[in-house]
Image (spheres, rainbow, N blue to C red):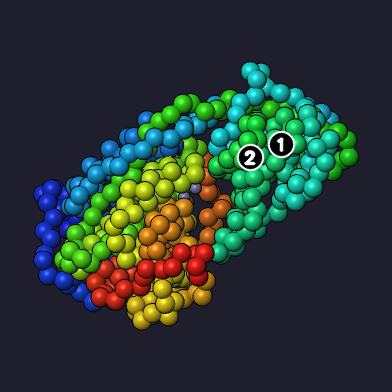
Amino acid sequence: MKRPLAPLFATFVAAGIVALPSAAIAADPAVLRDAALKDDIAFDILEGLTTEVGQRLAATPAEARAREWAVTELRRAGFANVHVETFTMPVWQRGEETAEIMSPFPQKLVVAALGNSSATPAGGITAEIAAFDGLDALVKAPAEAVRGKIVFVNHHMAAQQDGGSYGEIGAIRRSGPSIASKKGALAIVIRSIGTDHHRVPHTGVQNWIDGARPIPAAALSVPDAEQLARVLDRGKPVTLHLTIGAGMAGTGTSGNVIAEVPGRDPKGGIVLVGGHLDSWDLGTGTIDDASGLAIVTAAARRIMASGQPRRAIRIVWFGAEEPGGFGGDAYAKAHVGEKHVLVGESDSGADRVWKVDFTAADPKAPLTVRIALALAPLGITRGNAPAHGGTDVAPIARVTGAPVIDLHQDATRYFDIHHTADDTLDKVDPEQLRQNVAAWTALLAVAAEDGEELGPVAPASAR
Ligand code: ZN
Ligand code: ZN
């Protein structure tokens, strides 16, 4: 049978009800885990959200439609206490975007504005390029080398299983525009923070720091950045014409969508699992981060179908992660008084989980061993780094001392697609998606039922 779980799910959906047995979850974590290797719930969520809503730029009408879709689908799947917690935030929107080398070799380049970029004057700007190989070179450059020019920052990011270079090289996107602005640049174009060789630029957020004046800030696709570097290597001054129509568009509403599997023990606290509902506007936000929502929600749904866990499982589809973690901050503020026994998020695509890390009061606590053992048959090894939880759950962990779990996904392909127009459903490997669901199901089956506590964890400053 191709899709063994679909009829069961469809029955629940059609009936509009889901029985919540009052007994403990029925099966051994290993049984639930292995059954999840045949999961189709996650793909159904992923396909539905990315088809029926598509891109979901934060605090825009598209994200509002996504919240409505989420509430309908989470209620239909039988979750309890499904609701939206809204907040307001600044809205940024994309406009026209073109780049063209005017001299010495006239030709068009492919470009996309970065989040919070300002616009060029109508008709664009034309200026000489000031090129830098990496962020350090820009930091060290005298202002005279930059003033009145369009800065170009190149780099050499390679694909890695742990995606580690995103932190270091991603600083070009996060900080480069502010540094260029403070040195008097007219605009900045960076080589996309990506590892592909397709003509699709990678957008992403940057914030104006220390009062830096907003300037046009954009990313060239990797092949276009390499082309520009070759043109620059010819040693002649290079003039670029850049048109960016992006800009701030007032204040809008975003929101966190919350759903629960109630726990048997009213004092058992909450196991929080999440991902983010908003996306960038270029693709359909499939690997970033509809897949994360689909994975954790399918896992919770599978636990719910097997019985009622000791502790509540709370699913949060965070709003507005991409522009700077507004959803995670709003959640932490609203829920600081609640007992969170473990928090984790899925936000690195849909490829397989390969490593688990924990932050717990006792890093060697037996419960962490039980969780790691439940994950091991999926090919997941235990790491020895502290878990961070990501932009969405780190704030609640910080304010409550909640223990954190990271299920690290294979990021080798992630930065080929991340934040591009290529972030579409066809990039998802259903088998690897199922392995993710199995991992989160195993985690929830152990963590929501086990009586041991892993926290609270002392604040980072006290550790
Ligand atoms: Zn994300
Ligand atoms: Zn993202």
Give the position of the N terminus as an image quadrant.
bottom left
| Front-most of residues 160 and 317 | 317
Q: Tag 2: residue type? A: Asp
Q: Secondary structure at mark 2?
A: loop
**Which residue is at 25% across, 64% downward?**
269
Residue 41 location in percent, x, y? 28, 56
Find residue 210 and name its label.
2
Q: Are marks 1 and 2 in contact (CB under 8 Å)?
A: yes
Q: CA distance from mark 1 to mark 2?
A: 9 Å
Q: Which label lies toward us, 1 or 2?
A: 2
Please state which amino acid type lies under the numbered disc 1.
Answer: Lys
Relative horizontal placement of residue 345, taking residue 191 as reference (left or right): left
Tell me residue 427's x, y (percent). Answer: 47, 51
Question: Residue 235's image quarter?
Answer: top right
Residue 37 visible, this angle:
no
The answer to whether 228 is drawn above or below residue 102 in the figure is below
Q: Is residue 324 above or below residue 269?
A: above
Callout 2 environment at 10 Å: few (<14), some (14 to 19), or many (20+)?
Answer: few
Q: Residue at x 32, y 62 (%)?
A: 340
Left or right, residue 305 beside residue 348: left
> Foreground: 107 or 81?
81
Report the side of 217 relative to 92 (left or right).
Answer: right
In the image: residue 48, left or right of residue 89? left
Question: Observer-nearest residue: 221 or 258?
Answer: 258
Place residue 247 in its image quadrant.
Answer: top right
Residue 324 can be seen, yes or no: yes
The label on residue 131 is none
Residue depicted at x 53% and y 49%: 417
Classify mark 1: helix, strand or loop: helix
Place of residue 76 in the rendered image (x, y in percent of width and height, measured from the top left): 19, 47
Q: Residue 182: which numbered mark, if any?
A: 1
